[in-house]
Amino acid sequence: MFKKTYPPFLGAFLLLLGFKGFSQDIVEPNRYTASNKGKLFVSWGGNRAGFTKSDITFKGEDYDFTIKNVTAHDKPKGWHIDYINPARMTIPQTNFKLGYFISDKYTVSIGLDHMKYVMDNNKNRELDGYINLPSDATGSIYNGVYDNQNFFVSEEFLKFEHTDGLNYIYAEIARYDDISSLFRIQNTDKFQVNITEGIGAGVLFPKTNTTLLGKDRYDQFHVSGFGVSLSAGLNLTFFKHFFIQGDLKGGYINMGNIRTTHNSADSASQHFFYKQRVISLGGIFRV
């Protein structure tokens, strides 16, 4: 019988190949986008908002009435330099968020949604309650008892806006999922596609512009209530650190203590649902 032998260089060659493959597995770095835990992100953008009808109740020393089924609209700025002008950033409808990845898929964040709410004026609404101002007061022409009465809400009777703005300050927890493979994207460090879903809660800190029953205009920030929100978005990340994100967001707002005049005895309350369409630009970096 003959014993099989191999050329000595063949064993060395195979050993070299194995070592090369092993060394590549050891030294080849993971992609930056392969793991998110420990990353910080920040974003800035703009929104369009919509609101459901709401009943607004106004209370004071000489009146207590509710205007029913009030409609409202937002106050968009459009594409404008004010979005990035530090001195005028509160003029457009804007969104800010600062967050941190506590794991590869979950984030915690704080944010500010600066929406604008403008009550539709010069409309017929139902009015329920009473107004009994002193006879020498400008608004005394509206004195009376109203029982779900059809009433023309003019600008002289009431102007009611959260235009600087309807500020929702919230904390949020969200989930991120990389779906780049669905689009056959190989190198996510160059381009990555994520979907996001979040749930948040916070306070409403509006600056409400009001003229009511001929009283002097009032315009001050005030913690007025609370809100909750749900969101879903599509995140496109470029070159590891920069992203553009589109979100659909909706929620519930309950403001039980809205300041309306310089007299702290005067107040309003309302609650409604809202929706937002948000486009944001941002950056993401490992801390």
Image: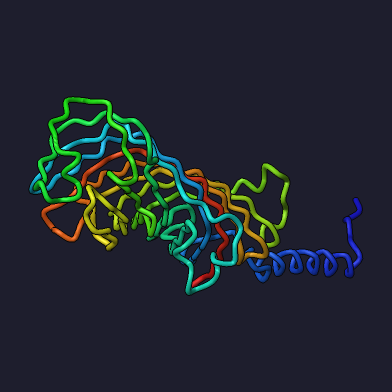
- The image position of residue 18, as x and y in percent, is 76, 64
Which residue is rendered at x = 47% and y = 74% of the image? 87
- The image position of residue 71, as x and y in percent, is 38, 36
Which residue is rendered at x = 51% and y = 62% of the image? 44
Which residue is rendered at x = 35% and y = 56% of the image? 167
Total numbered labels placed on residues in the image: 0
Image: 95 above or below 182:
below
121 relative to 235 in the view: left or right:
left
Which residue is rendered at x = 52% and y = 46% of the image? 277
Q: Nearer the viewer, residue 269 or 281?
A: 269
Q: Nearer the viewer, residue 10 or 166?
A: 166
- The image position of residue 281, as x and y in percent, is 57, 61
- The image position of residue 145, as x and y in percent, is 13, 31
Q: Nearer the viewer, residue 125 or 254?
A: 125
52 relative to 75 in the view: left or right:
left
- Display coloring: rainbow
Note whether residue 171 is visible.
no
Image: 35 above or below 29:
above
